[in-house]
Amino acid sequence: MRTVHYHSREHYRDKVFPGPFYSRQKALNVNREWSRWYDYLSVPAYSCSTTEYFAGRNACAVFDLTPMTKHRIGGPDALPFLNRLVTRDVARIKPGRVGYAVWCNDEGQVIDDGTIFHLREGDYRLCSQEHQIDWLMINALGFDVTIVEDTHDVAGLAVQGPTSCAVLKRMGLAGVENITPFGIDFFDFEGTELTVSRTGYTGDLGYELWIDPGHAEILWDRVFEAGELHNIRPMGSDALEMLRIEAGFILAAEDFMPAMQTVRPSHTRSPFELGLGWLVDFNKPLFNGRKALLTEKENGSRYALVKLDIEDNKPANHSYVFDMKEKNIGWVTSAMWSPSAKKNIALATVEAPHGKVGEEMQVEIYYQRELKWSRIMARAKVVKDAFWDPPRRRQTPPADY
């Protein structure tokens, strides 16, 4: 038996919706600029993306997560269904825990990445960048599972940065400091249930808060009241982009193309080619793409996604990557000057067998100053670790900053 539900909205009337936090965002959006994140209005920057970035690294930054695609998955076959869907062993994600995952087509190419929240025994929420309801429906054939796209039924706030735990404690969430990384806990809040997970997209100490949309505004108010003495700031997507690059986190449609969206099959990527081989578990039962991934593991991959430490301070946006003999071997997918790491950093795709840690390369960078374009060939080195990974990210309980 399979039950599938899609919470639809009247898209023929409204193409984009203000989210549940819209009234609070509008009051703080000094720039009066809005972007679109699927069905919702989103904020690129409330005032200054740099200031918002530093709030995420030095204090507390708050980002509206509501538009992220969310699916509630339950029923007797929820676990075997998810284990067939994704490459990792979902049985290892115990109740009250969150796990990062990718899922592939039959050719072992990544359709999307996301997080699996095991809320309570047999009750899961799958969060992803792209809409996945069609793929989930196709793969549910033969499983006794319920699938509900509840994107519009859950409001989400990311509360990120070194003072984030102190803010949530000041809110009165007793014991929130005991949540370990990728853990989940539940709290009574204004007559409803507030779900708090120690997760985030910044590579720093941080939490994500999930609540019914009817309580969204009061949640925003309580968070900002508690954070007044902790330099809390709202954060837009521009600052979040900077934070996630420093953390070495990939983004669909920027660092890889989802396999269901490509016209040319050669433009897709496997988990191994995205540095996510650790998410592929060949010891569990059959999963989508298993045969193709086994073949790739034996024969080798086409590409490697690498982290580059680049000389000078000119960001390598949309740059080509060359070996030391000036042969083109790849391209940069994400790049920035990192204020926290004090480095010129990038994520890049390079052709195999290139990409080993310590390998030196060159990046062709074009930059403009006062309408004049210049070109440099900057030396770069492949590094292993994230550019930003502070110990407080794992510390439990976190220190009060």
Image (tube, helix red, strand yellow):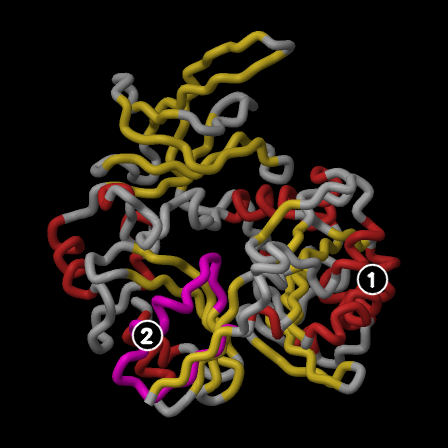
Image coordinates of residue 314 in percent, x first then y, are 54, 22
Q: Which residues are magenta?
A: 127-149
Disc 1 vs disc 2: which is toward the camera?
1
Answer with left or right where residue 241 lies relative to residue 134: right
Image coordinates of residue 259 in percent, x first then y, are 31, 52
Residue 197 drawn above or below residue 205: below
Local SS, label 1: helix
Answer with left or right where residue 343 lies relative to residue 258: right
Residue in the image at 22% along x and 38% along y: 352
Residue in the image at 66% along x and 53% along y: 41
User: Which label sits on residue 224?
Assistant: 1
Residue in the image at 29% along x and 39% along y: 356
Image coordinates of residue 354 in percent, x first then y, are 25, 35
Nearest the camera: 115 or 311?
Answer: 115
Which residue is denoted by mark 2 in the rendering? 89
As for residue 196 lying within the magenta part, the answer is: no
Q: Which amino acid, by three-letter code, is at mark 1?
A: Phe
How packed mark 1 is, by other alpha carbons closer than 10 Å (few <14, some 14-19, many 20 or more), is: many
Local SS, label 2: loop
Q: Which amino acid, by three-letter code, is at mark 2?
A: Asp
User: Which label sits on residue 121?
Assistant: none
